[in-house]
Image (spheres, rainbow, N blue to C red):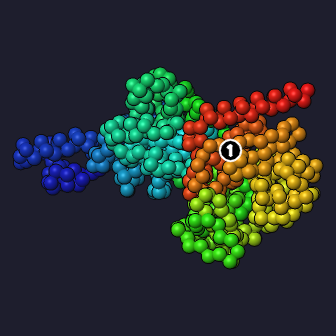
Amino acid sequence: MNIKDIANLCGVSPSTVSKILHNKDEDISVETRKKVLEIIKEYQYVPYSKVINSVAPKTNMIGILLSEDMYGVQEILYGIEKEASENGYSILLCNTAGDKEKAAKFYQIFGNKGVDGIISICQPEELPETIKIPAVRILDKKSGVRKNTVADIYFEMQDAGYLATDYLLEKGHHKIACLLEKEDTEIEKGYIKAYGERFVSPNKERVFLGTEEDIIGVGIPKCLNGDITAIICANAEIGNVVYEKIRERGDTVPNKISVISVRDSSLAEKLYPKMTAVHVSAGKIGKAAVNALIQIIEGRKPAYECREKIEPDIRERNSVIIPAGNVQGGKVVVVGSMNMDCMINVSHIPTGGETVRAGNMVSLPGGKGANQAVGAGKLEGLVYMIGRLGNDSDGKEIYNSLVSSGVKTDGVVFDDSIPTGKAYINVAADGESTIVIYPGANERLDRSQVRQYEQLLDDAQYCLLTMEISEETVEYTIKKCQKKNVKVILKPSAVEKMKESLLEKVDYFVPNEKEVMQLIPEAPTIEERADILMQKGVKNVIITLGQNGCYLQNADYKGYFPAAGFYPVDTTGAADAFISALAVSLSEGNDILQAVSFATYAAGVSITRQGVQPAMVDRRGLSLYQEEIGSFYNEISMEKKRCETKRS
């Protein structure tokens, strides 16, 4: 700042300012003199400061430009003061209160005082565009590179949102709400990113962006009236209100709902229970800012080499637990077909030469592979899909159905040369159905694609296979599963014969009654057909019998399971619902009787709805039948014990 700058601010000539500074102001009015002196005092102007600063030694003073509403500013300031003091520097503090004009004035004051450098803890736009003093900005997001005299020390709130969400997902929470302030869009991006990487698509209706008043009045009640198991809060203050509202309902944190804050503070430590939070170390930020500034001041490094990102971490306390009843099982990989199902409703299934008028027709995502993946995903299984789609609208619709159901789609390929497969399904009034399949892109799901994505089988517990894809691909996949100790669950769709060399490698063989009759026509009964399959090397035979339930046979058990008592609307997806639920239950460590009981009810619920994938029940829906499933399992277990007692 110089005399001309003072004159411009006062609206007088530079000579007038000079006369006042040198006490030669006899001909200047009292009002003008007072105005000039007030500006000089306000800006702490020192005459000839540029000359003095150019020849004077360092002041060892750092100017701190801060805005009190910046996240963590108090803690960061403590860190700066500590590090500056240890390096022989003192600080000069100015609070902009978010005012850009104030920031410009304080910058002039820093120049007049001869500070060696500036640390800015305010919004990027508050630091003047042109700045000649070495400076470091502390920011809550990555910003564009400024002049070479300016370095950035930054952290990203998107990282905080991602870390909080990923932490909850790791704990087994899938239904996570966010209570964020209007400006917290970066946190929302992190939430969406974490969901996308964790096999589950986020439900944006669970993200509430608003004022603090809106969050308390609308957002919190909306969360507590839903089915969510965890809440991400913008800060500990909002988290504290969540605590109170949960207590008012007679519940507690974290037994009812887990709570985490994306901004740590001293309040999080004082709450009961202490609140888990995403922590960005103020000490690290302060130290990094001071060290960067000193290196620039002393000419050891240029500003562009002093940029540094501070990574957040989780401070685990007592407000987050694994959700009640949640035990996510091991990895399940589905290798199979994906089709667009054309559902045609008819009064009865047409016979040879008969023409039947359709009552309705609708197209829905399907294919046994995709159906089983969606079924497992909706039941919160850890499920991956390997399959092939045409690069067309049908393919994109199927892909979106997979993603929205929680399926990891790393192994899905879009083929530009062939359309997505189709299945034409006649559904009769009594729920029975017939299917005609055009394989389309499924024909190109070959061993080379399985080889390309075979790493998805690493650490997998189960692989679901159907014979809607080529036998060569099935055989190759089974060999890979054997090498990686992955158990195979096979559905023999649309085949009349199978190699015995394949059967002996199958852990769970799940045909329906018609399919087992085609494969084993020489045996007259279900039990005898299961015996023959066991003799061929199958370890567990489960024959689904529609409204009559299913039959299970393995080395330890032989017996029928009745169907769950649901009225059929559409039975098309029952077998896929059964197999996907069987795999999820087995992956969670349940025994085969419990898994079949669980699968029986999943299939039962599915037949009460139209379609296949839309009819698949989710975990919450199936939990409504938890007591019935438990009773069903207990009856089967007791029957098994009675049979074992008779044999002994």
Of 566 and 271, the residue lying toward us: 566
Of 71 and 443, the residue lying toward us: 443
Specify few, some or many for label 1: CA neighbours under 10 Å numbering under 14, 14-19, or 20 or more.
some
Q: Quadrant of residue 426?
A: bottom right
Residue at x 68%, y 66% (from the top left corner): 435
Left/right placement of residue 26 relative to residue 298 reads left
The answer to whether residue 467 shows anywhere in this view is yes
Q: Position of residue 351 (x, y in %)?
A: 68, 71
Identify which amino acid the numbered label 1 is placed on: Ala
Residue at x 47%, y 50% (from the top left corner): 204
In the figure, 354 relative to 306: above or below?
A: below
Left/right placement of residue 220 relative to residue 470 reads left
In the figure, 84 relative to 181: above or below?
A: above
Q: Which residue is mark 1?
A: 563
Left/right placement of residue 424 relative to residue 561 reads left
Residue at x 43%, y 35% (from the top left corner): 224
**On the rendered image, what quadrant is the C terminus found in?**
top right
Q: Position of residue 505 (x, y in %)?
A: 89, 52
